[in-house]
C-alpha cells in the first residue's frame, strides 16, 4: 500500500520562485514519484490569523488553487481541497484542546516568536499547533513534508496523537497513527534580489508567474558587489535554473560583466517561467473548472475525515 502524504499551504498572497523551489517543486516531485497517496490542502483557516478580509481571502484561495494546478499538481492523482470545507478539522481541534495544556502550547517556537514581536496574540496563533495536528491526523497521514524549521509542528502532532491514544485508546487501541516528518534536506533557501532569503515581507521576490517585464525589473534590481568578478547574488539565483557546470563557463567568459550576466539570467528565468505562466493564464480563463476541482477534492477529503471523526467521537463517548 502507498503511504499517505499530506501537505498544506496558506493562501497568503503571490507565489514567488522561493515558494516554488522551497516547497512547491517538492510537492510535485512527491506526487509524481508514485509512492504516495497525496492530499494537498489550501490552509485557509490557518491564513485567517493573517488575512481578515473576505474579498482578499477568496482571491488568494483561488490564486493558490491556480498555482497548484499550473505547476503540475494533478487532481486525477491527488486530492486538492480547502481546509475550511471540512468541518472535522475545527471539531477535532476542540477535542485536542481539551487534553492540551497552555504551558505546552507556550513552548511552541511560533508562539514564542509571535510573543517576542507582539504581546497581543490572538488565540488562533496560540492554538495553531492543535489545528495543524487535526489537519494531519484526520487523514491517517504517514508522511508530512516540511522544512527543518517546521519539524516541531510534527513533533507536536505526534505528542498529541500519543496522548490521545493513551487516554482514550481502550485495550491499547491505536486511534491515531504517529506521522513522520519528511525533512526536505535538499530544499534550497532561495535568495531574494537583495541577497536575503526571498520573502514577500522583504519585498525582494521574483513572482513565480512573472511577466517578462517583471522578470527584467526584478533581475536588474539584484544587488551586486563590485569587489568581485562574480556577482554572488546573481549566481546564487542563476544556479536554480542552470547547471553549475554550464554556469562556470558563462561566468568565466563574462567576469566583471554584471549587466551581461543579468541578461543571461533574465533569459533563463523567462524560459523556465513562460510555460508555467501560459498554463496559468489558460486555467484562469475557466475559474469554474478550478472551483469544480476544489469541490470534488473536498468531497473526497470530507469522506475520509468524517469517517475518522466518527471513530474519534466513539472513543470519547459522544457519538
Image (tube, rainbow, N blue to C red):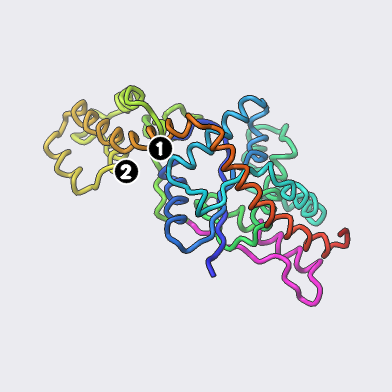
Element marked by disc 2: loop
State the residue lying farthest toward the bottom: 171
| Residue drawn at (79%, 51%) of the image | 97
For label 2, the crowd category at 10 Å Cα-Cα, with few meaning under 14, some 14 to 19 and many 20 or more, is: some
Relative to 129, is 219 on the left or the right?
left
The quarter of the picture where the N terminus appears is bottom right
Name the spot of residue 161 as percent of width and height, x first. Answer: 70, 62
Q: Is residue 304 above or below residue 274?
A: below
Q: Is residue 234 left or right of residue 85?
A: left
Residue 224 screen position, x and y as percent: 28, 29
Residue at 56%, 47% in the rendered image: 80
Where residue 67 sits: x, y (%)?
48, 38
Q: Residue 174: say if magenta.
A: yes
Count of marks, rendered view: 2
- Looking at the rendered image, the quarter that the C terminus falls into is bottom right
Q: Is mark 1 on a helix, strand or loop?
A: helix
1 vs 119, nearest the viewer: 1
> Magenta residues, as a range?
157-183
Residue holding disc 2? 240
Q: Residue 17 carries which label?
A: 1
Q: Name the residue rendered at 70%, 48% in the picture.
A: 131
Task: Determine the residue located farthest toward the left in the rendered image.
Answer: 253
How far apart are the two marked residues, 1 and 2, measured between alpha carbons? Answer: 10 Å
- Residue 227 occupies quadrant: top left
Q: In this view, does 242 lie above or below 316?
A: above
For the residues bearing labels 1 and 2, Cβ distance under 8 angstroms: yes
Judge by depth and name the residue closer to the eye, 258 or 119: 258
Residue 314 is situated, as x and y percent measured from the top left of the image, at 83, 63
Amino acid at each position: 500500500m502507498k503511504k499517505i502524504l499530506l501537505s498544506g499551504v496558506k493562501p497568503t498572497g503571490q507565489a514567488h520562485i522561493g515558494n516554488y523551489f522551497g516547497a512547491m517543486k517538492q510537492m510535485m516531485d512527491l506526487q509524481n514519484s508514485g509512492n504516495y497517496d497525496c492530499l494537498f490542502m489550501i490552509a485557509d483557516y490557518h491564513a485567517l490569523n493573517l488575512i481578515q478580509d473576505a474579498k482578499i481571502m477568496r482571491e488568494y484561495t483561488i490564486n493558490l488553487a491556480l498555482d497548484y494546478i499550473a505547476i503540475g499538481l494533478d487532481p486525477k492523482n491527488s486530492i486538492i481541497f480547502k481546509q475550511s470545507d471540512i468541518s472535522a478539522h475545527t471539531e477535532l481541534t476542540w477535542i485536542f484542546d481539551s487534553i492540551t495544556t497552555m504551558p505546552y502550547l507556550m513552548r511552541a517556537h511560533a508562539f514564542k516568536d509571535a510573543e517576542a514581536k507582539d504581546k497581543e496574540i490572538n488565540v488562533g496563533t496560540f492554538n495553531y499547533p492543535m489545528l495543524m495536528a487535526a489537519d494531519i491526523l484526520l487523514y491517517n497521514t504517514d508522511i508530512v513534508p516540511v522544512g527543518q524549521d517546521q519539524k516541531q509542528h510534527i513533533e507536536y502532532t505526534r505528542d498529541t496523537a500519543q496522548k490521545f491514544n493513551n487516554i482514550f485508546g481502550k485495550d491499547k487501541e491505536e486511534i491515531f497513527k504517529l506521522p513522520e516528518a519528511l525533512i526536505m534536506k535538499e530544499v534550497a533557501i532561495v535568495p531574494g534580489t537583495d541577497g536575503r532569503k526571498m520573502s514577500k515581507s522583504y519585498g525582494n521576490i521574483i513572482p513565480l508567474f512573472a511577466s517578462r517585464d517583471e522578470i527584467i525589473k526584478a533581475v536588474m534590481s539584484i544587488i551586486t558587489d563590485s569587489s568581485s568578478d562574480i556577482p554572488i547574488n546573481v549566481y546564487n539565483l542563476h544556479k536554480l535554473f542552470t547547471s553549475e557546470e554550464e554556469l562556470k563557463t558563462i561566468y568565466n567568459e563574462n567576469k566583471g560583466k554584471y549587466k551581461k550576466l543579468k541578461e543571461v539570467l533574465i533569459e533563463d528565468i523567462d524560459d523556465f517561467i513562460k510555460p508555467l505562466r501560459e498554463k496559468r493564464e489558460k486555467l484562469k480563463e475557466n475559474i469554474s473548472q478550478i472551483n469544480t476541482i476544489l469541490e470534488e477534492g473536498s468531497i473526497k477529503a470530507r469522506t475520509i475525515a468524517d469517517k475518522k471523526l466518527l471513530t474519534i467521537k466513539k472513543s470519547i463517548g459522544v457519538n
